[in-house]
Image (spheres, grey):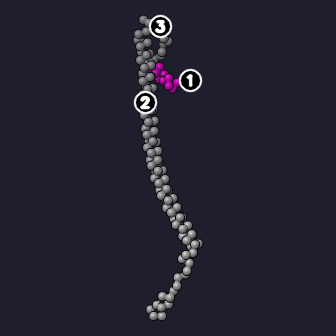
Amino acid sequence: MSDQALSSAETIIPFPNNGDALDKAGHAACDLVQQAAGMAEQKAQHIMGVAHKLSLQLRAAEDRLAALQAEVKHYRDRADRAEKWLHRVAIEIEHKFFASPNGQNSQVPQVPTEQANLKIYEPKRLQST
C-alpha cells in the first residue's frame, strides 16, 4: 500500500455516539432478551426431561396394569373352575349319600347327569341379579 493510503486510514475518527443513552438501553434490552432466551431454553429442557421421565413411569404403570389384569383374569377363571368343581362334588355327595334305595334322590330333585349339570352351572359371580 502506498503511504498516502496508510495516512488516510490512520485519520479515521470513530463516530462519537459511545456514550449515547439510547444505545446503552438498546444493548441492555438485547442482553436481557438473550438472558431470558437462555433461561427459557433451560426450563424447556428441564420440562422435557420431566415429561420424558413421567412418560416412562406411565408406560411402566400401564405395563404393570396389564400384567395385573391378566393375573386377575387368571385367578377369576381358576375361582370359577373351583366353584364348578365344588358344585360337582356337592352333587356327587347328594347322589351317593342321600339317594333312596330305589335310586331316586329323596331330598334333592334328580339331576340328569353331573356333566350336564356342570355345563349349565354358572358361578355365582357371573349370575345375573
Q: How far from the left and from the top, in percent, is residue 81?
A: 43, 25
Mark carried by residue 106: 3
Q: Main secondary structure of the magenta part?
A: loop
Point out the frontmost of discs 3 and 1. Answer: 1
Task: Name the kind of residue labelled 1 in the image.
Answer: Thr
Ranked by sequence position, the earlier of labels 2 and 3 is: 2
Residue at (43%, 26%) from the top-left corner? 79
Give the residue number, with chain letter if any, for mark 1.
129
Q: Which residue is at 52% across, 24% downward? A: 127
Report crowding for label 3: few under 14, some 14 to 19, many 20 or more residues within 10 A (C-alpha).
some
Q: Quadrant of residue 15?
A: bottom right
**Mark 2: which secondary structure?**
helix
Residue at disc 1, secondary structure: loop
How far is disc 3 from disc 1 in space, using C-alphas?
30 Å
Q: At which x and y percent is residue 49? A: 45, 53
- Amino acid type of the residue tagged 2 in the rendering: Tyr
Looking at the image, tell me whether mark 1 or mark 2 is earlier in sequence order: 2
Q: Amino acid at mark 3?
A: Ser
| Real-space Cα separation, disc 2 to disc 3, in angstroms | 37 Å
> Residue 69: in sight, yes or no?
yes
Q: Which residues are magenta?
A: 115-129
Split into 4 quadrants, where in the image is the C terminus? Answer: top right
- Depicted 111 relative to depicted 57: above or below: above
